[in-house]
Structures are given as structure tokens and as C-alpha cells.
Image (tube, rainbow, N blue to C red):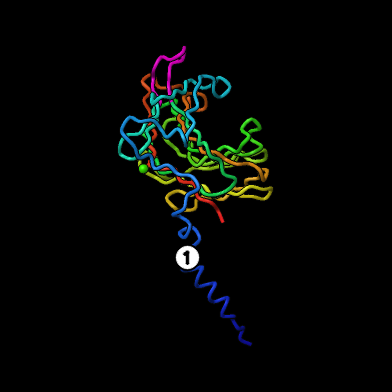
Amino acid sequence: MTRSIKPAAIAAAVLAFALPTWQAQAQTYVFNDEFNGAAGSQPDPAKWEQQTGCEWGGGAEDQCYTDGGHNAKLNGAGQLVITARREDYNGYRYTSARLMSKQSHAKGRVQVRAKMSGWQSGAWPAIWTLGQPEALWPRHGELDLMENGLNGSRWRPEYHVHTETSGEGGEYAIDPSQWHVYEVRWSPGASAKASFYVDGRLVKTLPYAVPANSPSTVLLNIAVGSYAGTPDPALNSTMTIDYVRVSALP
Ligand SMILES: [Ca+2]
């Protein structure tokens, strides 16, 4: 017997083919920064909190984070540049910057186009999200779209999830000193998952079990030392970011 197909099903199938969900929604962002602005200007204060201070990673990290355009500024070519460098500052030997988005989102898709300068010991650049409230970490989750510098003598960009039950992750097979789009799509809940992409290519889907109310902020920073090793005495490491775009998931 031949199975009949209802016209409505055909129409739905054609529509789904004609309008891939992600392409159809790609133009609408719930949060984004293209980093357009004058060379030397600061990141938009309406969008980013510049987190400052010198006691990070339980005191294991070697940087002070500054604001005021000292270590994070626009380059006038539509990009944000974060620089970690050797510099005496408040009794510390390195300065850097850490930006956290002022908006948080309970689910969605984060895309960040970025590139890094060459590997140096002690440089720990990261593009990530943090489930709020942060004080309960890792209960509300962390998603590392790109974390680098944790593996010794060369760049090996990685992705990870961090929850109460998982710290899984892996490596991207790419050269992070070239431009790449790092992406994660996630939703909350006990059986939720997070999918990591690079340049639009699915790399891995991992469990991401966090409470339903775990809105995530986006973070951009270069830490120094700690898990990234003894800092290079001449450290001067940059992460250049073309855009941060957050889209809603259906
Ligand atoms: Ca841009």
C-alpha cells in the first residue's frame, strides 16, 4: 500500500526547507555589538561592564583588570582590541581587561568573530558565558566558546561546559591567530544541551544541565598566569573581536 502524504505536510516540509530556522532569524539579535566607533574609544558602557581589580582566580592570576581604555579599546576599524601586557600596576606585573555584557539571556545563540595574536606563555584569552548568579558557580553554568593558553607551548583553542555535573570539552582544529567565528547554542533545564560551532560548523553537542532560571552574560577577557603558565616577561597579547551577536532560540 502506498502511504499518502497530506498536502499540509508537504507545505510544511517545503517551508522548512526554504527558511532554515537559523538563517531566518540570523538578522535579529537580542544583543549585539559590532564595535564600530572611533579609534581609541572605550567599549560601549551601555552594553559592557569593564570589570576591574587585581584579585582573580582566588589570587592565582597575575593580572589587574583596568578600565578607561587602558587595556580594552576600539581600533577604529570596527573591532574591539583587548590587550594583556607586562606593566607594573598596583603591585602586580601585568594589566589586562575583562568585559561582561550588561544583558543576560536564558537561552539562545552567541556568535563571536575573533582572532588572537601569537601564543605567549601565561596568556589566557577567553570568550565565554556565565550563568547568573555568578556567586553560585558552577550551578548556573558556564559555556566557553573559546578558551586558549591552557596547554603549554602553542595555542590550542578549546570549548567547554561547566555545570555542577560536567566539565566536558574539547579542541577546535583551527588556527586561532586567524579570524574565526566561535558559536554556542544553548537552552536551560535538567536535560538541556549546548552545541559548539566554529565558522558555522557543528563541532560538539554536550549536556548542559543548569536550572531553568540561569540567564547568561557574555564575557571577553585575557587572564594572565595561573593555568596558562608562568607569564612571558615581555607579555603583550591581544584578542581582537569583530562582533558579539546574541540571537534568540525559537
Ligand atoms: Ca565589527
**Which residue is farthest front?**
46
* 14 up-or-down from 42: above or below: below
Q: Residue at position x 46%, y 35% from top?
A: 46
Q: Residue at position x 54%, y 72% from top?
A: 12
* 200 up-or-down from 129: above or below: below
Residue 162 in picture, x, y percent from top left: 60, 38
Image mark count: 1
Q: Quadrant of the C terminus?
A: bottom right
Label 1 element class:
loop
Residue 74 in picture, x, y percent from top left: 35, 34
Pick the front one: 27 or 179: 27
Q: Quadrant of ligand 1?
A: top left
* 112 up-or-down from 69: above or below: below
75 magenta-colored: no
Quadrant of the image occupied by residue 40? top left
Q: Quadrant of the N terminus?
A: bottom right
To which residue does mark 1 refer?
A: 19
Residue 149 seen by the camera? no
* Residue 102 horizontal side relative to residue 76, left or right: right
**Which residue is farthest top?**
91
Q: Amino acid at mark 1?
A: Leu
Q: Residue at position x 46%, y 15% from top?
A: 92
Q: Which residues are magenta?
A: 84-96
Tag 1: Cα neighbours inside 10 Å, few (<14), some, or many (≥20)? few
Residue 60 in picture, x, y percent from top left: 54, 21
Query: Mark 1 near ligand 1 (CB under 8 Å)?
Result: no
* 209 up-or-down from 8: above or below: above
Residue 37 seen by the camera? yes
Majority secondary structure of magenta residues: strand
